[in-house]
Amino acid sequence: MTSSRISLVMLALAACSDPSQEEPLAPDASRPDASVHDASAFDSAPRDAQTSDGAIGCPPARDGRSLDQLVRAIVSNMMTSAGAGSNALMVPSAAARDAFADSVVGALSGDLRKACKLPPSYRIVALRDGADDVLVAAELDPSGAPAPKTFWGTYAARSPATGTRAIVLEAPHPLFDTNTAYEARAVFSEARGDWFLMAGAHRCANAESAGCDGTTSACGGSSAPYRVSDTAHATKTPFFAVHLALSTKTDDAFIQLHGNAQACPDALVSDSSGRYSDVSTSARLAAAIEARGPSVGRCGLDYPKAGCNLCGTDNVEARATAGASDACTDKGSMFGRFVHIEQLPSLRQVPDGGAPKGYQPVVDAVKATFAVR
Ligand SMILES: [Zn+2]
């Protein structure tokens, strides 16, 4: 977090190492139709507007939806527009990828000039999230409806405030790992995290290989290299670049949420190093989850083992934060800021207020583990 976040301007407001066993996409029938879009709640803002402080920039549009509603609308669109085999992801050049990340992180930190540098399909919207102001960068049309062109993902940042936590929530597999996008959003909102990152396409959307370490049978057939659309295993993705930019710019911890269907405990927790330390952030979060009821496995201690082996050691975001010079091929060595959680379907269910508790124990464990500012 830097002081630039303080300058936030609010217009009108003043894995998976072998994910072959991951959960396939299933419709979430437990919630109302997320595709419903209330255009009346959205005030479109022109680009290159004159801002109140005299600087030229592209101010956010005010959005009356909740972040949950916005995320659900985007995921609903993604299911039909960016599924497995869709080849939806527009793979950027390295320069375009890095420029995008710079624009996203800058714009969501309050630099309205950076917002003007986003691809034309992207808009910045401002919404309320509980007690906080949140800016979101997403591919939306002028009415606020999802209108993806690049499928580079959705990103949100919370305005600095007392009571927030220095954490980044990541959902790299929003379609393949059922409910993890909604879970990441819930943790971000309830724990009042700094950043929320959600991939823009199915991990198996594109046929092209990522060119990074590891193989998977997640996309069908025999084991094959990860796809370029697999944001947890491809450094060509804008999602990866935004992660790397945040890893460099902030001291925040990262919590990356996945889903599996292996013969595993409810949660399999790792710092992606392949080792275990009792005093690590991942160990503390594992204990906090366990204390709330779910069974927990600990990578580097009693896992990986046959039939339950998803410890995230070839996860490119984990490697980048560990200081890898090239996260595609280099593991890095400075682990501790990144926590990788694989979860059985029951732990990823949307809580219904009673039983099942779904992901509520994870939300509560994060709140108990990470200090409040
Ligand atoms: Zn996953």
Image: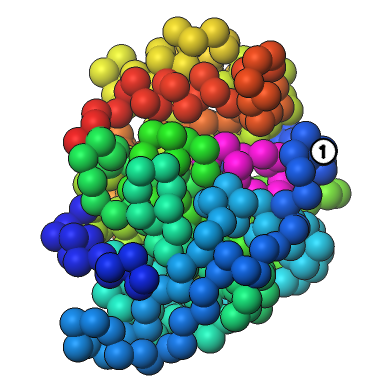
Quarter of the image where one finds residue 334: top left
Taking the image as drawn, is residue 85 in sight? yes
Specify whether residue 222 is painted magenta: no
Q: Is residue 171 above or below residue 278?
A: below
Q: Quadrant of the C terminus?
A: top left
Where's residue 59, x and y in %? Answer: 37, 78
* Residue in front for this viewpoint, 301 or 118: 118
Q: Is residue 262 above or below residue 296?
A: below
Amino acid at dot 1: Ala
Where's residue 75, x and y in %? Answer: 68, 55
- Colour scheme of this structure image? rainbow
In the displayed structure, does residue 89 sit left or right of residue 46? right
Specify whether residue 177 is painted magenta: yes
- Label 1, secondary structure: give it: loop
Where's residue 33, x and y in %? Answer: 78, 49
**Measuring 82% from the left and 43% from the top, which residue is drawn there?**
27
Q: Which residue is mark 1?
A: 29
* Residue in front for this viewpoint, 25 or 154: 154
**Measuring 27% from the left and 74% from the top, which residue is drawn there?**
111
Taking the image as drawn, is residue 302 in sight? no
* Residue in front for this viewpoint, 105 or 338: 105
**Measuring 63% from the left and 21% from the top, which residue is drawn there?**
353
In the displayed structure, does residue 91 sit left or right of residue 53? right
| Residue projecting furthest to the left | 3
**Measuring 26% from the left and 18% from the top, which residue is drawn there?**
279
- Total of numbered circles in the picture? 1
Circle 1 residues within 10 Å: few <14, some 14–19, many ≥20: few
Q: The magenta stretch spans which residues? A: 173-184
Where's residue 264, x and y in %? Answer: 65, 18
Mark 1 CB near ligand 1 (8 Å cut):
no
